[in-house]
Image: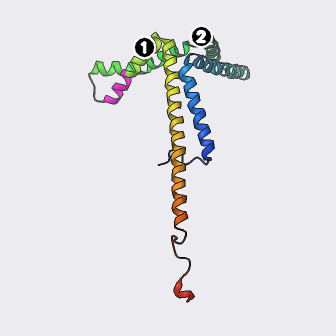
């Protein structure tokens, strides 16, 4: 089974792409602190520019509430640009707000019928507490997980190129030996005799 059979790419090109993805994954793992800070800062620059443009273009048409929301977004993007670990704190608070009400309601009503949602809420609550208390390590852990995923994807692609090449070679060798035999007869002996 070919994992990347739908890609219309030469084998050499796919090998190069897989090695690049693996190399990027290794960089993510080894330099997770720098990669996370750089990625967050770049995204905050983009968000700040977009919010500023939105604020300037819609200032005359926006309500006071919308103007305040845009100002909060601008200030938030500046704060996260200055201190990137705030991102994990904000994500932790957001996950906590999402998961705790369901967990509280389940425990209060003693309704444990939806086990999947209960497990997800518990894991989400624990992860959010981890993000809030240890923001730097949580950010590094997320970047490490992304790096591991890149390394696995790159290795699978690399292996798949060798597997694909071996299958193509086997089919070519099989066809080379069976030149006289085709799928169907093209000449009908009775017709030409």
- Main secondary-structure element of the magenta-colored stretch: helix
Question: Which residue is located at x 51 percent, y 71 percent?
Answer: 181
Q: Position of residue 36 (x, y in %)?
A: 57, 19
User: What colouring style does the render use?
Assistant: rainbow
Q: Residue furthest bottom?
A: 193
Q: Nearer the viewer, residue 164 or 65?
A: 164
Question: Which residue is located at x 42 percent, y 14 percent?
Answer: 129
Instruction: Using the image, tell me which numbered label, if any, was put on residue 83.
Output: 2
Range of magenta residues: 115-122
Q: Position of residue 76 (x, y in %)?
A: 60, 13
Q: Nearer the viewer, residue 23 or 48?
A: 23
**CB contact under 8 Å: marks 2 and 1:** no
- Closer to the chain start, of discs 2 and 1, is 2
Q: Nearer the viewer, residue 130 or 22?
A: 22
Q: Secondary structure at mark 1?
A: helix
Q: Is residue 117 above or below residue 4?
A: above
Q: Secondary structure at mark 2?
A: loop
Q: Quadrant of the C terminus?
A: bottom right
């Amino acid at each position: 089974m070919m994992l990347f059979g739908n890609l219309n790419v030469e084998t050499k090109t796919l090998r190069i792409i897989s090695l690049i993805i693996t190399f990027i994954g290794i960089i993510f793992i080894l330099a997770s602190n720098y990669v996370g800070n750089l990625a967050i800062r770049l995204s905050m620059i983009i968000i700040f520019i977009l919010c500023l443009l939105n604020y300037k273009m819609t200032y005359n048409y926006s309500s006071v509430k919308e103007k305040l929301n845009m100002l909060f977004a601008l200030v938030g993007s500046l704060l996260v640009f200055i201190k990137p670990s705030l991102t994990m704190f904000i994500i932790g608070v957001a996950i906590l707000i999402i998961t705790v009400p369901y967990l509280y309601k389940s425990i209060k009503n003693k309704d444990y019928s939806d086990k999947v949602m209960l497990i997800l809420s518990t894991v989400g609550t624990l992860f959010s507490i981890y993000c809030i208390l240890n923001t730097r390590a949580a950010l590094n852990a997320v970047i490490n997980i992304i790096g591991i995923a890149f390394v696995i994807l790159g290795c699978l692609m690399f292996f798949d190129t060798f597997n694909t090449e071996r299958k193509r070679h086997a089919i070519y060798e099989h066809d080379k030996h069976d030149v006289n035999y085709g799928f169907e007869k093209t000449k009908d002996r009775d017709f030409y005799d």
